[in-house]
Amino acid sequence: MDLEFTAEERAFCVEVRSFLRQNLPADIAAKVAAGEELAKADIERWHAILNDRGWLAATWPKDHGGPGWSAVQRHIFSEECALHDAPRLVPFGLTMLGPVLIRFGTQAQKHELLPRILDGRDWWCQGYSEPDAGSDLASLRTRAVRDGDVYVVKGQKTWTTLGQHANRIFCLVRTSVEGKPQAGISFLLIDLDTPGVEMRPIRLIDGSYEVNEVFFTDVRVPVANRVGEENQGWAIAKYLLTHERTNIAGIGHAARDLARYHTLAATIRRDGRSLADNPLHAVRAAEIEADLEALRITNLRLLATARDGAAAGIGSSLLKIKGTQIRQELQSLIRSALGPLAAADANGLADEELAVPPDAARAAAVFFNHRKLSIFGGSNEIQRNIVAKRLFGD
């Protein structure tokens, strides 16, 4: 197994870096570096720049408007974007629904919807979790009852990320109560301006407005908006979540945050010495760095198997578990290093030994926001079950 990049892949690294230096707007990169919330216009601007270059839908084949990249090229692009403070693209249309439509959609659905994802006319959000169905997604209760050529949808979805910006939502709905719970689920595409749809904001612990709850009251959805066969939505959901979990690992983002921590530790002085010389902080940072390097090697091994045409197997679950743990530990370390300066109301706390980094006031908010990483996309506990079942059987 060769874990080194080929000459062509190294050349691609150079190409991506050059593109980012020339085309990533400085104001957007500055917001990302400072941990600030991006406006919808910021996300749409970067979306359009990548689309013009043909690099927007990294996981799509060329014949559907993607760049047709290999798994290694996608990895390189993701890493370089993170290291250059490019914003994370909203994944719901690009890396979740898009691959689902390419794999399971009708020709009419592909023809209509894929171009609208690329040019930004449609902003999709995800309707999976419910108040009593999160990690145990098979227990979802939102019903879709067939009425001629439409489904009548009733129920509620929650934790709908960035739904306030979306005009469409893809949902798992229950179309049958017969047999196993997984066997009665279908995958529906719903316009959010349909009568009976209501979206309400949920304020997070850090005070931000990022997620929502969505209510469906007798919402009439054309049967033509179903992806795949009726009651076959569980297989589609598992396929989609594989893409989401790999994306959540965020190896490039962890590498960027670790570099920031080292800069921070060298800058802050306490008791007359640099924080980098504090043995407790040094040990924690070394442990995280070792874990991150092991995760990077694991990812490269999975990329090597993909290069050879093999399936990733439980790889996405493993990357999701360890990647989210590392990112959470990093944010904890950064917040610990900043101490009281991590608070949003830390004005006036600095003295001659405590230089305040520009993103210090966001550190606590980012720490709290990262608590979600080990939960969404299938909680880490669920991922461990998946790994155990695959390795040891039921």
Image (spheres, rainbow, N blue to C red):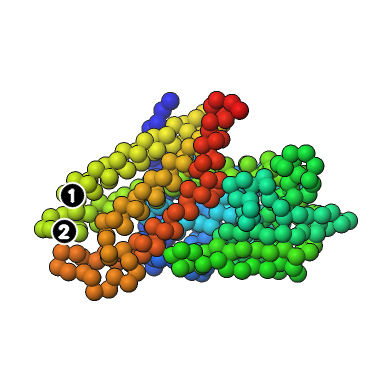
**Residue at far left of view:** 272
**Residue 56 image offset from top left, x and y in percent:** 53, 54
Left/right of residue 4 with respect to residue 57 in the rendered view: left
Q: Residue at x 47, y 67 (%)?
A: 208
Q: Residues within 10 Å of mark 1 (few under 14, many from 20)?
A: few
The mark that comes first in sequence, 2 or 1, is 2
**Residue at far front of view:** 132
**Residue 66 appears in the rendering:** no
Which residue corresponds to mark 1?
278
**Residue at far right of view:** 148
Quadrant where the image shows the C terminus = top right
Quadrant where the image shows the N terminus = top left
Along the line of sight, the residue nearer the viewer: 175 or 299: 175
**Residue 375 image offset from top left, x and y in percent:** 51, 49
Residue 2, compared with residue 249, is above or below; it is above
Residue type at mark 2? Arg
Count of numbered badges drawn on the protein: 2
Residue type at mark 1? Asn
Residue 31, compared with residue 113, is above or below; it is below
SS under mark 1: loop
SS under mark 2: strand
Left/right of residue 104 with respect to residue 43 in the rendered view: right
**Residue 130 appears in the rendering:** yes
Q: Residue at x 64, y 47 (%)?
A: 137
Marks 2/1 in contact by CB < 8 Å: the verdict is yes
Separation (CA) of disc 2 from disc 1: 9 Å
Left/right of residue 108 with respect to residue 344 in the rendered view: right
**Residue 21 image offset from top left, x and y in percent:** 37, 57
Which residue corresponds to mark 2?
270
